Each structure stands twice: as structure tokens, then as C-alpha cells.
Image: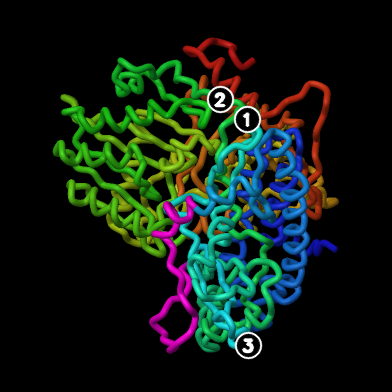
């Protein structure tokens, strides 16, 4: 039953509802087999991330006082039990989908993935040779015996291992335990084998190592063997989840009880209890910290499954050149004429590359500021910034040190940039810059020209062409002036509350004016509706969790405002509650590209306003991050985004409607089919030089 006095769906269960939507997409046999594998890979990533982030927090909340839990309307024991049951059911569906759906679909298209089966006789020599020539040098067989030491780390996080029980030949009553790593980083998870009868064959690297274990342990008999992986620990996100005073109370209570965060060891299904008991004793953990996960672990590696055939995945959508940002013209001259909007991954990222490359060599550019969020070794942006610094320009880059990312890689590339003269500003716990922004200052006779990049997604994701995002390139004076104010503040690395006077008007900046701005825009729609005028709000977002924003949407819906919410994953707003949210529709979209854009639409008496943003409506993003929302002021660009939103609302192929209990109900229709990602790609192809009425 829904508690109408607290009409907020639990974020944990909503996350699991999104995960189930991924399974539904993987179940769809109209989706090409390798694309189905990628959805399973995404599910695997999401469920592992869920256990890394959410379960430790819920376990911690078991230890806090009842008055806090009552205030949060949260009962961890019951919720954890519900979660584990839901996950168990989902994992069973995952295994069935993979074994009975996707693997046979691959074989129907002449690709044989060895899956829970021995190698065929003609492949045995290749498997052994491959192991000797390629694998042997990278494996490290280790016995789990000998002196215990707190300094010994048996299993490194996020790596795959095989754990063995074995005995010396002729001594079956004296078992030993050992482990060996699976060198995925060096060789990849999937290995192509020679063709047989015209069919392609692919094997897990795990199975190749497993089939050659006797070579690693000569003189021993192997009794049994099971896969194991340790999940990297995440910091308890108490400060990000709760208001400051409540977070401090929770932290004090946990400290008083000497709370220790649980570990997560994922093991192959069927690992014997005595093996778990032995490992728990050696590792100093609880047996309950082992979670069984099927025959193979870390299925997110399916993302890199080898593919050599168009019939196994979606046909290629070539990146569309931007109609008004063609090569050969200065990008700054183009922006002086008008703002420009990129629809990614449909548009080519060439204009963004040129934006930074041109800034790096333009003799009139003096300063460059950019928020990288994550530094990636393959990023075009890193090289541009290094070039700019070596050309004598002042370059300031903001980067995030997040355990979720590869911190060592971030530090390595940060050092390279610093050595070139780039000033690197790493985030602080209370000052994490999630905004995707850049500012270029160019000296002219009359002063300064400023050019800005504002996006909904990170630079490091652009080259993969896997995410749906939007990016604005502009020289608009108010926007660029306010962006310079923001960068000026960020360099101080001080608390936002000390700079509340900063006059942000065009931009929405979280921890400054974003909350108030959004609420004011919704209140305006409420006022219009109560005056008998049409009023509407559409929010296209990844996550909607912040209860104050949800309460405001409830209020607007009750006032007659038509509200459409399009989410990618979590949504704590409960639709279709009588008298509370019966004027609010919530849909969720999963398709070939990962939806990452955030679009906020307000009808405004027919003078429609659209904002893009880098941040979701979560407590974390609104109160503990620096995110930036920005208006689309150009009429032509606004008309593009209006059509983008219409396509989202019209989708009847990949969209599902969420009910009161977060069930995913397909809205599929066979008449006048609309698939939004296809429609928006075609829209991007049709965009020409400001053609009047193109989107009418």
C-alpha cells in the first residue's frame, strides 16, 4: 500500500525498477543480439553499482535511532529484505534471458559463444596454445596458506579470480586453497577462436584459464573451482543523501557504534559453504558478505563483446555534420552571428573539438576555463588544453577525484597538464563540480569577447557516441558573463554560502539559485492555470528524487498544470495517485543510446521556455554539487528542442509508462510508429541553415 501521507517512492526500489526495464529491452527479440548483450551489460553494471552504493547505506541506517528512521519514513530491515528478494528474481530472469534467449540468438546468426560448456575437440589445441603464448605471462597463481598479515591483500577490487580447492597428488585428505587472476585488462574478456564449419566461436577468458589450471598447478589435483570478484568500496553518501543537520546526527550515531562498512564479495553460484567459511576467515569478513552471481561474474564486459557482422547490432548512424559549423570558417565568427546547438550523439562532435583547438592556437585567446569532471586518456580536450597552455594562455581546469573513476588515470593526466602549465583544481567534498561548462576569453580592441560551451553530459563520453546529450555553444553576453562569475568563484574553492550574492539570472546554478528558479517557474504555471490559462511542465531527466521538487510538482498537478515526466532511471514521484498526482504522467525510455540529457520545459502562456541542465533533481545535485542549467534563447534552437520533446512524448516503441508501483507498462503501438531516438536522428539530418517553419 502507498502511504499517501508520504507520497514518495523509495529510491532504491525505483532504481531496481529501472534495472528491470533494462532486462525487458534485453528480452526483446526484435533487438539485435549484440545490442541485447549490451543491455545485459548495463544491467550488470547497474546492479553491481547498486550493491556498492545503496546496500552499505541501508545497512548503516540499521544502526541509527528510531526517531531518525521515522522522520525518514525508512525501515531498513524490511526494505533490505524486499530488495534482496527483488534482486534474486531479477538475476534469475537475467540468467534465463542470457542462456535461453541471447546465446541461442547469437548461434542462430552463426556466432557460438561458449557458455557453461566444454570446448569442442578441434579447439582444444588452440585454447592450450593461446594460454601458453598469451595468458601464462599475466597470471599469478597464489596459495591461500601461510602466515596471516594485515598488509596482505589477496583480492584486488574489480578484478576477476578463480578460487580453487586442490590437493597434492596422492593426498586427497589434505586440501589446500589457492587462487589465480583472470588477466582481463591485458587480454580482454572475450577471445575469438578459429571458425568451425563457417561459424564464429568466442570464449570467455575465464574458461580458457580454467581449462589450463593443471598447467599452473603441476603435481596437484583440482577438486573444485569457483569465480570470485571483490566490489570496490564506496563512501557512505550520508552527506549527499540528507540535510546537513540530519546527516551530522546519523554520522555521530554511526561513529559512536564504530560502524564498519560491509564488503561485497561476488562469487559464482554454488560455491560451497565451507569454501566461503574458509575465505571469510582468511579475509576477516562475514560469510553473509558473499553474494552469488551465476556462472560468470562481471557481465558488464559484454559491452566489449567482439562483433564482426552488421546483422548482430544496429546499423551504423553516421554522425551528422553541423549545418552552420562547417570546417573552414572560424568557429568564433560563427558564434558571433548566432548561438549553436548540438544534438549528441547524432551530430558530429567536430565543432566541439574545433572550439577548443581553435582557442589553443588563436593569438587573441588569453584565458580558457573548463570543468572536465573526469579526465580521460583518450580525450581530445586534454591535448587541446596542453597545447593552449604551451602557447602561453592561462588555462584552468576543474576535475573530479571520484573512486568510481580511475583515480590513478585522473592523477596521471592531471600531472601531464600541470607540467604543461595548466592549473588543475580538484573538487572538494562540499564543492564537487558536476557542471559541463567551458569559457574562452578572447582579447579584442574594445575589451573582451567571451565564448561558452554548456552541456548536459561530460566531455569524456563524447567520442564513444553512446549517450544522448545536448550542448550549447554561445557568445551571449549575459550567459558568458555569468559563466565567468561562476568560474571566478570556483577558483576560490570556498563554500557557496559565502558567495550567495553572485547575481546569476540567466543561469541556474545549484547551491545558488537553481532551486528557487525552478520553483518560481513551476509557480508561474500554477498561477496561470488558476487564472484559467493553459499551463504545462515537461521534465526530461535521468533521476527525479528530491522531495521538495516532487512536492512542488504535486502542487502544480493539483492546480491543473499538465505535467509530463520522462525519466531514464530513478523516479520517486508516484504518478496516478487520486487527488495527488492524477494529472502527472511518468514515462521511462531505454533504447540503443543511453539517455543522459536534461530538458526542462514551461509553457508560459504560449511563450514557451526551455532550459537544459547538467544535473538531475536529486538532493545531491541540488544541494551538494555545482550543476548548471541554461536557457535556450535563440528561437530557432528552441524550436528544435520543442520538436525533440514532442518526439519523446510521441514515442510508442521504446517508451514505458510507470504506474503507482513503478511497473514498466509498454505503450507500444503498431499504427504510426514513433521511436524517439530514430526520430531525433532524422530531425538532426533535416536541420539546415535556419529554415523557416522546419519544425511546424
Q: Which residue is mark 1?
A: 314
Name the residue nearer the viewer: 103 or 384. Answer: 103
**Residues marked 2 and 1 touching at CB (< 8 Å):** yes
Secondary element type, mark 1:
loop
Side of 456 relative to 548 (left or right)? left
**Residues marked 1 and 3 touching at CB (< 8 Å):** no
Q: Position of residue 518 (x, y in %)?
A: 56, 45
The answer to whether residue 188 is seen in the rendering is yes
The residue stretch that appears in magenta: 129-157
In the displayed structure, 16 sits above or below 107; it is below
Q: Is residue 187 magenta?
A: no
Q: Nearer the viewer, mark 1 or mark 3?
A: 3
Q: Residue at x 30, y 33 (%)?
A: 356
Name the residue nearer the viewer: 426 or 430. Answer: 426
Q: Which residue is mark 3?
A: 173
Side of 613 relative to 59 (left or right)? left
10 Å crowding of disc 1: few (<14), some (14-19), many (20+): few
Q: Nearer the viewer, mark 2 or mark 1?
A: 1
Among the 4 quarters of the image, the one containing residue 289: bottom right
Q: Position of residue 347 (x, y in %)?
A: 49, 26
In three-dimensional space, the C-alpha distance between marks 2 and 1, rounded to whole angstroms, equals 9 Å
Q: Is residue 130 magenta?
A: yes
Side of 259 relative to 348 (left or right)? right
Secondary element type, mark 3:
loop
Secondary element type, mark 2:
loop
**How are the colours assigned in the image?**
rainbow
**Residues marked 2 and 3 touching at CB (< 8 Å):** no
Q: Which residue is mark 2?
A: 317
Side of 90 relative to 347 (left or right)? right
Amino acid at each position: 500500500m502507498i502511504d499517501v501521507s508520504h507520497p514518495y517512492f523509495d529510491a532504491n526500489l525505483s532504481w531496481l525498477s529501472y534495472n528491470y526495464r533494462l532486462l525487458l529491452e534485453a528480452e526483446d527479440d526484435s533487438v539485435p543480439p549484440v545490442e541485447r548483450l549490451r543491455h545485459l551489460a548495463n544491467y550488470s553494471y547497474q546492479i553491481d553499482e547498486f550493491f556498492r552504493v545503496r546496500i552499505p547505506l541501508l545497512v548503516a541506517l540499521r544502526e541509527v535511532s528510531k526517531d531518525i528512521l521515522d522522520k525518514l519514513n525508512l525501515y531498513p530491515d524490511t526494505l533490505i529484505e524486499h530488495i534482496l528478494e527483488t534482486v534474486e528474481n531479477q538475476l534469475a530472469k537475467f540468467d534465463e534471458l542470457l542462456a535461453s534467449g541471447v546465446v541461442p540468438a547469437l548461434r542462430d546468426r552463426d556466432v557460438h559463444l561458449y557458455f557453461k560448456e566444454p570446448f569442442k575437440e578441434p579447439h582444444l589445441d588452440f585454447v592450450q596454445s593461446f594460454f601458453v603464448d598469451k595468458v601464462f605471462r599475466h597470471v599469478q597463481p597464489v596459495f591461500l596458506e601461510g602466515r596471516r598479515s594485515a598488509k596482505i591483500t589477496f583480492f584486488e577490487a574489480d578484478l576477476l579470480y578463480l578460487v580453487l580447492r586442490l590437493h597434492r597428488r596422492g593426498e586427497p585428505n589434505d586440501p589446500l586453497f589457492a587462487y589465480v587472476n583472470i588477466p582481463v585488462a591485458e587480454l580482454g574478456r572475450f577471445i575469438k577462436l578459429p571458425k568451425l564449419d563457417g561459424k564464429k566461436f568466442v570464449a570467455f577468458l575465464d574458461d580458457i584459464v580454467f581449462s589450463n589450471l593443471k598447467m599452473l598447478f603441476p603435481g596437484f589435483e583440482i577438486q573444485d573451482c569457483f569465480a570470485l570478484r571483490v566490489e570496490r568500496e564506496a563512501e557512505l553518501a550520508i552527506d549527499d543523501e540528507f540535510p546537513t543537520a540530519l546527516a551530522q546526527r546519523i554520522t555521530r550515531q554511526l561513529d559512536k557504534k564504530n560502524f564498519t562498512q560491509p564488503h561485497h564479495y561476488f562469487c559464482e553460484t554454488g560455491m560451497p559453504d565451507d569454501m566461503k567459511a574458509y575465505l571469510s576467515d582468511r579475509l576477516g569478513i562475514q560469510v553473509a558478505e558473499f553474494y552469488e552471481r551465476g556462472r560468470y561474474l562481471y557481465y558488464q564486459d559484454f559491452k566489449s563483446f567482439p562483433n564482426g557482422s552488421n546483422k548482430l547490432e544496429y546499423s551504423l548512424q553516421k554522425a551528422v555534420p553541423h549545418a552552420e559549423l562547417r570546417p573552414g570558417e572560424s568557429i568564433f565568427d560563427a558564434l558571433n552571428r548566432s548561438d549553436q546547438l548540438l544534438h549528441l550523439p547524432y551530430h558530429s562532435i567536430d565543432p566541439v573539438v574545433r572550439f577548443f583547438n581553435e582557442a589553443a592556437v588563436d593569438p587573441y585567446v588569453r584565458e580558457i576555463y573548463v570543468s572536465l569532471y573526469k579526465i580521460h586518456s583518450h580525450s581530445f580536450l586534454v591535448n587541446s588544453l596542453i597545447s593552449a597552455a604551451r602557447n602561453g594562455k592561462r588555462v584552468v581546469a576543474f576535475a573530479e577525484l571520484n573512486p568510481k573513476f580511475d583515480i590513478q588515470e585522473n592523477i596521471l593526466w592531471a600531472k601531464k597538464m600541470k607540467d604543461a602549465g595548466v592549473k588543475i583544481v580538484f573538487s572538494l567534498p562540499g564543492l564537487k563540480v558536476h557542471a559541463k561548462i567551458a569559457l574562452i576569453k578572447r582579447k579584442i580592441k574594445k575589451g573582451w569577447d567571451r565564448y561558452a560551451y554548456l552541456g548536459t553530459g561530460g566531455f569524456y563520453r563524447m567520442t564513444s557516441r553512446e549517450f544522448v546529450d545536448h550542448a550549447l555553444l554561445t557568445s551571449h553576453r549575459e550567459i558568458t558573463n555569468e559563466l565567468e562569475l561562476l568560474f571566478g568563484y570556483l577558483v576560490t574553492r570556498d563554500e557557496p554560502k559565502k558567495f550567495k550574492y553572485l547575481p546569476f539570472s540567466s543561469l541556474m546554478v545549484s547551491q545558488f539559485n537553481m532551486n528557487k528558479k525552478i520553483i518560481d517557474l513551476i509557480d508561474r504555471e500554477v498561477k496561470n492555470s488558476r487564472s484559467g490559462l493553459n499551463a504545462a511542465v515537461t521534465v526530461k531527466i535521468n533521476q527525479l528524487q528530491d522531495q521538495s521538487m516532487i512536492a512542488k510538482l504535486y502542487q502544480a498537478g493539483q492546480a491543473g498544470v499538465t505535467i509530463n515526466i520522462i525519466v531514464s532511471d530513478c523516479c520517486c514521484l508516484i504518478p496516478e495517485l487520486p487527488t495527488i498526482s492524477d494529472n502527472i504522467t511518468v514515462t521511462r525510455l531505454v533504447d540503443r543510446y543511453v539517455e543522459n540529457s536534461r530538458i526542462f520545459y514551461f509553457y508560459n502562456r504560449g511563450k514557451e521556455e526551455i532550459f537544459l541542465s547538467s544535473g538531475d533533481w536529486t538532493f545531491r545535485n541540488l544541494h551538494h554539487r555545482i550543476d548548471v542549467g541554461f536557457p535556450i534563447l535563440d528561437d530557432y534552437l528552441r524550436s528544435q528542442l520543442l520538436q525533440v520533446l514532442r518526439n519523446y512524448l510521441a514515442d510508442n516503441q521504446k517508451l514505458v509508462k510507470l504506474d503507482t508501483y513503478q511497473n514498466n507498462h509498454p505503450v507500444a503501438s503498431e499504427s504510426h510508429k514513433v521511436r524517439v531516438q530514430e526520430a531525433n536522428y532524422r530531425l538532426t539530418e533535416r536541420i539546415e541553415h535556419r529554415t523557416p517553419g522546419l519544425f511546424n
